[in-house]
């Protein structure tokens, strides 16, 4: 997602028309991949896709990215916990669970994606989620006395136990 987005963004200043065509070819291949595999993507992968749409839709495939991106945003928001606003942890390299805030593969990317996507295609539900999740992020910053950890997010936050870790 980030590589495809980087190419679309690089194309905006590129003078070599042949290179620009190749950049947009990658963009189209990635867009088609998302569209074809949408139902099999986990929440992390959907978040990466939404970030890609938010960064690139004003430059290419705008209508298609708006429509598919809005569907992805809805799917992600519909799967967030009602109280904690987090998506269940579903990434294959992370512990799985509905009470785990995965800040390595999922929630960090979903949050960033929502910032960019909402800028391009605002929604009341998205803005409300962003405001509340921003508060959640501030609340769960590490408050330990360890200087190197104080104020950070350490990867996996166990919402039920209000503690960092959530798996091994």
Image (cartoon, rainbow, N blue to C red):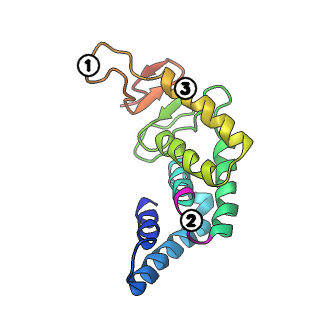
Q: CA distance from mark 3 to mark 1?
A: 22 Å
Measured as percent of width and height from the top left, residue 8 is found at 47, 69
Residue at (61, 67) in percent of width and height = 35
Q: Residue at x 68, y 30 (%)?
A: 82
- Residue under numbered circle 1: 147
Q: Element at badge 3?
A: helix
Q: How many dots with numbers?
A: 3
Q: Circle 1: is it few (<14), some (14-19), or many (20+) Cα within 10 Å? A: few
Q: Secondary structure at mark 1?
A: loop
Query: In the picture provided, is 2 more to the left or to the right than 135?
Result: left
Magenta: main secondary structure equals loop
Residue hosting label 3:
136
Judge whether residue 59 is colored magenta: yes
Position of residue 134 relative to residue 22, above or below, is above
Rendered location of residue 164, percent (x, y): 41, 23
The front one of 167 and 8 is 8
1 vs 2, front mark: 1
Check the picture and name the quadrant holding the C terminus.
top left
């Amino acid at each position: 997602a980030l590589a495809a987005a980087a190419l679309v963004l690089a194309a905006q200043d590129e003078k070599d028309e042949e290179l620009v065509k190749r950049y947009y070819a990658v963009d189209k291949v990635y867009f088609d991949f998302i569209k074809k595999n949408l139902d099999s993507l986990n929440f992390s992968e959907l978040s990466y896709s939404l970030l890609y749409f938010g960064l690139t839709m004003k430059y290419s495939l705008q209508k298609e990215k708006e429509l598919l991106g809005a569907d992805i945003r809805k799917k992600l928001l519909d799967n967030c916990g009602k109280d904690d606003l987090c998506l269940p942890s579903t990434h294959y390299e992370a512990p799985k669970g509905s009470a785990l805030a995965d800040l390595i593969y999922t929630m960090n990317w979903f949050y960033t994606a929502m910032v960019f996507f909402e800028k391009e295609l605002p929604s009341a539900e998205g803005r409300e989620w962003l405001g509340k999740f921003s508060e959640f992020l501030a609340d769960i910053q590490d408050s330990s006395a360890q200087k190197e950890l104080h104020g950070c997010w350490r990867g996996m936050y166990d919402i039920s136990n209000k503690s960092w870790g959530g798996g091994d």
